[in-house]
Image: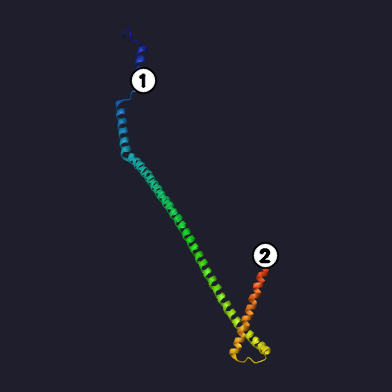
Amino acid sequence: MSPLSTPDADVLAAEEETTANLLLPHTYDIVWSLVIVVIVGLVFYKYVLPKFQAVLDERTAKIEGGLAKAEQVQEEAAAALAEYHQQLAEARADAAKTREEARAEGTAIVAELKTKAQEDASRIVETAHRQIEAERQTAAVSLRAEVGALATELASKIVGESLEDSARQSRVVDRFLDELEATEAGESRSAQTASAGSPVGKEG
């Protein structure tokens, strides 16, 4: 035994070697561990990873499809809104046009009714005037005949002779009516003169 080698030193060296063997695995352990890791990696890469990738692709496709569908729906909604505004504008324009046409038609109808009413009133007035004139003429003829008969009778009594001659009777009747009209005209002029000379007439 060398002077430097002591039992304690040998124990320490043995402990250090044991500790180093525990911390550093053996070569076959490292090789088998690498083999297992490679096998697990191959299995994961060949079987598990494609499934994950498929799931991710499916979800990505769904998300992209949802986004595309949302954009399409938004575009359709925008188009529908624009069409609604256009239809609303057209409806307002049609309503305004219809209102103007109704107003113009109403004005035309009122004007036509006024014209027709005026024509009807004029026709009624003219018919009334004609009827009154006809009735006046009929009354004048009837009155003339009655007055002629009375005048003839009175003249026969006054003259003391018969006036059966139609020509003579007509002359007597005409003369009597002329005198009667002259008397009425004179009375009318006198009444007008008296009215003009009254105090009321002077004040005016």
Q: Secondary structure at mark 2?
A: helix
Please report the residue visible at 68 percent of the width from the left and 88 percent of the height from the top: 158
Q: Nearer the viewer, residue 82 or 118?
A: 118
21, 190: nearer the viewer: 190
Relative height, residue 148 to residue 113 (above, below): below
The secondary structure type at the circle numbered 1 is helix
Q: Residue 18: give x, y in percent of width and height.
A: 35, 20
Q: Quadrant of the C terminus?
A: bottom right
Q: Residue at x 34, y 22 (%)?
A: 21
| Vertical relation: 164 (above or below) 62 | below
Amino acid on which disc 2 is placed: Gly
Q: 53 or 100, which is in the foreground?
A: 100
Label 1 CA crowd tier, 10 Å (few <14, some 14–19, many 20+): few
Q: Position of residue 163 (x, y in %)?
A: 63, 91
Query: Residue 149: percent from the left, percent from the top?
Result: 64, 87
Tell me which amino acid carries mark 1: Thr
Residue sitting at 52 percent across and 66 percent down? 114
Task: Report the side of 114 relative to 180 (left or right).
Answer: left
- Which residue carries the number 1 mark? 19
Quarter-of-image position of residue 53 = top left
Q: Do the CB atoms of the residues marked 1 and 2 lie less than 8 Å apart?
A: no
Specify the label residue 3 is tagged with.
none
Residue under label 2: 201
For this orientation, the residue located farthest to the right is 199
